[in-house]
Amino acid sequence: MTKYVMSVFVALFVPHVLCAEVVKNACLSVERKRADLDTCKCIQVAADATLTVSDQKLAASMILNPEKPQEIRSSSRRSMEQFWERYVNFGELAEAYCPKS
C-alpha cells in the first residue's frame, strides 16, 4: 500500500515540481528589467490556474522567443489552436489580477 501511495504522489506532484515556476523565471529573465518579482510571481499563479505543465513550458518559450507566438497562432494544428485559447485565458487572468510594473 505504501508503495502505491508513493507512486501516486510521484505521478501527481513531481512533474509540477520539475516545472515549477517556469513562467515566472522566464518573466524575470526577459521583461526588459521592468518586471519585479511580485508581478512575475502573480503571472506564475495565473499560469498555474489556467495552463497545464506542458502549456507552461510552451508559454515560457514564447516569453523567451518573441517570434514563437506568431508561429503558434499561424499553426494549423488543432492542439496549437487549443493551446492558444488556454493561453489567451491565462493572459486575461494575469492582466486582470497582476500588478503592473
Image (spheres, rainbow, N blue to C red):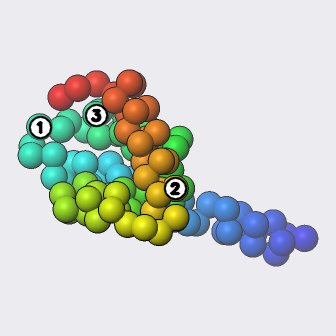
For the N terminus, the image quarter is bottom right
Q: Position of residue 33 (x, y in %)?
A: 9, 43
Nearer-N-terminus badge (3/1): 1
Query: Which residue in the structure is indicated by mark 2?
Result: 82
Q: Position of residue 90 (x, y in %)?
A: 43, 41
Contact (Cβ within 8 Å) of mark 3 with mark 1: no
Which amino acid type is marked by label 3? Thr
Residue 61 appears in the figure: no
Nearer-N-terminus badge (2/3): 3
Query: Which residue in the structure is indicated by mark 1?
Result: 34
Q: Which SS class for mark 3? A: helix
Residue 32 appears in the figure: yes
Which amino acid type is marked by label 1? Arg
Q: Residue 69 sits in which quadrant?
A: bottom left
Q: Which of the two residues, 11 or 43, is positioned nearer the viewer here?
A: 43
In this rendering, the label closer to the viewer, 2 or 3: 2
What residue is shown at x 25% (from left), y 38% (from top)?
37
Query: Which residue in the structure is indicated by mark 3?
Result: 39
What residue is shown at x 40% (from left), y 33% (from top)?
92
Question: Going by the picture, which residue comes out furthest to the right?
Answer: 1
